[in-house]
Image (tube, rainbow, N blue to C red):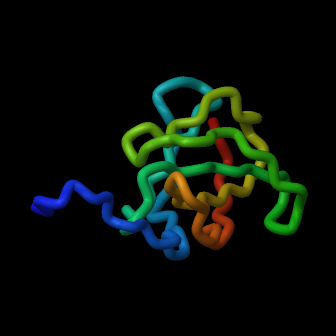
Amino acid sequence: FDCNNEPTPRQQPGKALIRRIEDGKRSGSVKIYAEALEDADRYKVEVAPSSTGEWRTVLDHGTLNKLELNGMDRGKELWFRINGGNAKWWGDASEPASFIPR
């Protein structure tokens, strides 16, 4: 506990790590499990049609408990990556991981 009430400076989060991906609760939904990162208080998820494709953000400022995406293309291989971030900056993206939603 810091009695000075001064905010602790945040560092840039490290490289994110996806632990596993599985089907979510609904058809076409995907649940991503990731390693918690020190200095990260939010997570961004990006998806692409291939590991070298054009990435688009599908979830911005999510928490590790809420990395479930809805409306993903069923039966098609998709590639996912995540970044951990804080109010100052985003960390490095995880290695891309593929999954076929049902």
Image quadrant holding the C terminus, namely top right
Q: Nearer the viewer, residue 75 or 83?
A: 83
Q: In x, y percent, where is residue 22?
A: 50, 47
**Which of the pair 31/14 is nearer the observer?**
14
- From the viewer's perspective, tell me whether residue 92 is left or right of residue 67: right
Q: Quadrant of residue 7?
A: bottom left
Residue 100, given in percent of the width and then of the height, sits at: 67, 48
* Picture quarter with the N terminus: bottom left
Question: Looking at the image, which residue sits at the far top?
Answer: 26
Residue 57 vs 13, above or below: the answer is above
Snapshot quadrant of residue 69? top right
Q: Residue 94, how many percent across, how many down?
A: 60, 69
Determine the residue positioned at 52% across, 68% down. Answer: 16
Looking at this rendering, what residue extends furthest in the front direction?
4
Depicted 17 relative to depicted 30: above or below: below
Task: Describe residue 76's horizontal placement relative to residue 80 as left or right.
Answer: right
Above or below, comparing residue 4 to residue 16 in the picture? above
Q: How many labels were placed on the picture?
A: 0
The quadrant where residue 96 appears = bottom right
Horizontal arrangement in the rendering, residue 99 relative to residue 84 (left or right):
right
Q: Nearer the viewer, residue 87 or 69?
A: 87
Q: In the rendered view, would you say 27 is above or below 62? A: above
Q: Residue at x 82, y 54 (%)?
A: 55
Q: Residue at x 60, y 61 (%)?
A: 89
Task: From the viewer's side, name the closer residue of 21 and 60.
Answer: 60
